[in-house]
Image: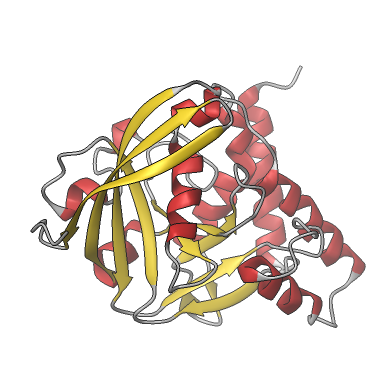
Amino acid sequence: MKTIKNVKQNIVNILDELLNIQRLAPVVFMIKRGDFIIRVRPDWGYNNPMGLSYPRDKKMVVMQRANIAGNPVFYGVLSDYNDHLENARYIAVAESSELLREKKDGEELFTFGRWQTIRPIVALTFISDETYPSIKDGIIGKFREAYLKKSALSEEQKMLMRELNKEFTKQVPRGAESEYYTTAMLCYKLMYERTIEGQSIDAIVYPSVQTQGQAGLNIAIHPDVADNSLMLDRVLEAKLHVKGMNAYLENCKCMDGKFNKVC
């Protein structure tokens, strides 16, 4: 009988084979200097950028969709429209709220960090023709169009991209984090062990399952890249109100990147 360890090793072997002979066909793109990335943390009272960045205690890092246990990444959100970051806040809350996930009434406190890129970030995505096809515009639409322009794709590449798309967009219930293993290990290998034409891969971008791909995309950034390429620009303390099918976010306190109140 196969053990969990054997299954994981088989996944690693398959990923190594796929990456070594370049059978995958992700879309590679550049997040330009000056763009914004939103990251949310539960509760209020943060007073330094490190508290709103990725977790520093590796022992506390569990496996998620784009990281293996013990290896943190900077999780954030790219808005469909850089001038309308409420879209990114919507995704961040949908991904983080216990009330929304459990469909319970109540209030939750969140602190949003608006991080600005001070250096370009090289990212890639496994969005394919089957990634939320009903969404025609926004970032997903642009990446799907870029993927479809890859005219030289083989049938094997198309099949592999569709299978990986299923992994990046599948619902994973709380407590079943081991189901993230394929995408988590893939992201680890890409950001830590691989390059594209000699260029390091800084980040992986993928749709929000909680919002069904709407309003923007999640991003996982290598921690060293986050330290050197992102600057905390604005901080917002907000309160989420949930009652039945209705929910709204109350903006309570706005601060600059040094935590001085500005509104």
Seen at 73% across and 70% down, the residue is 144
Numbered circles on residues, count: 0
* Residue farthest along the right direction in this orientation: 155
Residue 86 coordinates in the image, percent (x, y):
44, 59
Q: Quadrant of residue 132?
A: bottom right
Q: Quadrant of residue 209?
A: top right
Instruction: Determine whether, in the image, residue 250 is placed left or right of residue 83.
Output: left
* Residue farthest along the top direction in this orientation: 1
Name the one closer to the observer, 142 or 50: 142
Name the one closer to the observer, 167 or 260: 260
Residue 128: tell me if it is visible.
Answer: yes
Q: Which image quadrant: the N terminus?
A: top right
Q: Quadrant of residue 137?
A: bottom right
Seen at 50% across and 39% down, the residue is 64
Instruction: Determine whether, in the image, residue 244 is placed left or right of residue 157.
Output: left
Instruction: Determine whether, in the image, residue 240 is placed left or right of residue 177.
Output: left
- In the displayed structure, 237 sits above or below 23; it is above
Colour scheme in use: secondary structure
Residue 193: tell me if it is visible.
Answer: no
Q: Which image quadrant: the C terminus?
A: bottom left
Residue 259 coordinates in the image, percent (x, y):
11, 56
Seen at 54% across and 22% down, the residue is 102
Name the one closer to the observer, 153 or 193: 153
Residue 149 coordinates in the image, percent (x, y):
79, 82
Name the one closer to the observer, 151 or 12: 151
Residue 211 coordinates in the image, percent (x, y):
61, 47
Seen at 44% across and 67% down, the residue is 202
